[in-house]
Image (cartoon, coloured by chain):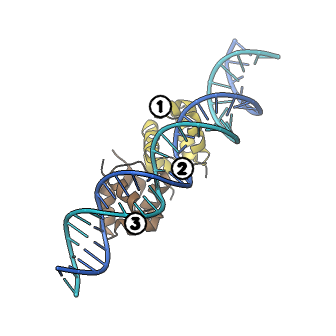
Chain colours: A brown, B yellow, C blue, D cyan
DNA sequence: ACAATATGCAATATATAGTTTACATATTGC
DNA sequence: GCAATATGTAAACTATATATTGCATATTGT
């Protein structure tokens, strides 16, 4: 399913998908697909995204 | 680096690498390599491991 | 109206996660 | 001593994450 917490955390920092992508070293499409829930990122990418956004894994990727 | 928190969480439940592997649907070698810090698992696998062990992503995979 | 920015989507290519098989060692119980 | 269990490691294979390119639309500022 969609990752709206990721989209929201990015919005609060006023970052575009492209800016986040560049910050973590992937392409814009990869960020877009993670937000769209269309795939299964690697742990290291999740960690890089969280650190860039000032969040933890549980904040963004843990589903209760 | 090694993931000793994973090894420890598994030990508390007295599960072998093989039992954990079967519970989450991967092979024993995959669990072994994650514990050895030799690769970068997918998010879905990390979540499955945490749920099986009664932990969260931050408990097992978040590095401060 | 037009340029610039942000996003969605899709096809093809490449890197790497995860499988399979196999062999090695250590430990424990009989 | 021997069988069974747990773990480490490695090569070759397959599935999939991620890159690259390209085109589409919506939005915003001038």
Q: Position of residue B44 (x, y in %)?
A: 43, 44
Chain ID of residue with mark 2:
B
Instruction: Please report contact status of discs 2 and 1: CB closer than 8 Å, yes or no.
Output: no
* The C terminus of chain A: image quadrant: top left
Quick check: A35 above or below C30? below
Instruction: Please report contact status of discs 2 and 3: CB closer than 8 Å, yes or no.
Output: no
Reading the image, the residue beneath label 3 is A20
* SS at badge 2: loop
| Mark 3 burial class by Cα count in 10 Å: few <14, some 14-19, many 20+ | some
Reading the image, the residue beneath label 2 is B40
User: Of circles 2 and 1, which is in front?
Assistant: 2
User: For the residues tagged 2 and 1, is the chain the same?
Assistant: yes
Q: Position of residue B59 (x, y in %)?
A: 47, 48
Q: Is A47 or D30 nearer to us in this picture?
A: D30
User: For the residues tagged 2 and 3, is the chain the same?
Assistant: no
Reading the image, the residue beneath label 1 is B23
Q: Is residue D29 left or right of residue A56?
A: left
């Amino acid at each position: 399913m969609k990752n709206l917490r990721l989209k929201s955390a990015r919005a609060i920092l006023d970052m575009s998908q492209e800016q986040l992508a560049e910050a973590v070293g992937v392409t814009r499409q990869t960020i877009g697909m993670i937000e769209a829930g269309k795939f299964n990122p690697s742990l290291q990418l999740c960690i890089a995204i969280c650190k860039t956004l000032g969040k933890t894994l549980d904040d963004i990727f843990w589903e209760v």
